[in-house]
Image (tube, helix red, strand yellow):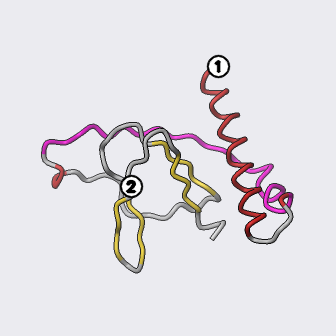
Amino acid sequence: SAIENYAIETQKLVIKILELMANNLGMKKEELHESFEDGMQAMRMNYYPPCPQPELVIGLSPHSDGIGLTLLLQLSDVQGLQVKKDGEWIPVSLLQNAFVVNIGDIME
């Protein structure tokens, strides 16, 4: 099915990202790959329609991603993702046709 194919392709992408990260950290590419090869992969889809009164939007509560990597594909122009840097929440700009890769708590 299309969902299964998507899951396989995203898994390949995550493995490639892990290999590149390992290389940049001076590790053997297999080290990070082995740490995650038997891990769980989950997919979640959220839809946030534009709101005429954005100040009333509640959204998700502030949180960190406890996993290894999060791949985010934003399909609309609705701004929502923010990252916390130096105690301040900063919006992440939309990149058309691109994944945002978030390093989770386990990787950090």
Residue 15, image x, y percentages: 74, 49
Image check: 4 left or right of 54? Answer: right
Instruction: Kindly identify which residue carries mark 2.
Output: 81
Give the spatial CA distance, label 2 vs label 1: 29 Å
Q: Amino acid at mark 1?
A: Ser
Magenta region:
30-52
Instruction: Kindly identify which residue carries mark 1.
Output: 1
Task: Name the main secondary structure of what is drawn in magenta.
Answer: loop
Residue 47, image x, y percentages: 36, 37
Image check: 49 left or right of 73? Answer: left
Q: Residue at x 66, y 27 (%)?
A: 4
Q: Is residue 45 magenta?
A: yes
Q: Residue at x 51, y 51 (%)?
A: 100
Q: Secondary structure at mark 2?
A: loop
Which of pointers 2 and 1 indicates the residue nearer the eye? 2
Q: Amino acid at mark 2?
A: Leu
Reply above or below: 28 against 47.
Answer: below
Rendered-image quadrant of the N terminus: top right
Image check: 40 left or right of 80? Answer: right
Q: Earlier in the sequence, mark 2 or mark 1?
A: 1
The reply to whether dot 2 and dot 1 touch (C-beta < 8 Å) is no
Rendered-image quadrant of the C terminus: bottom right
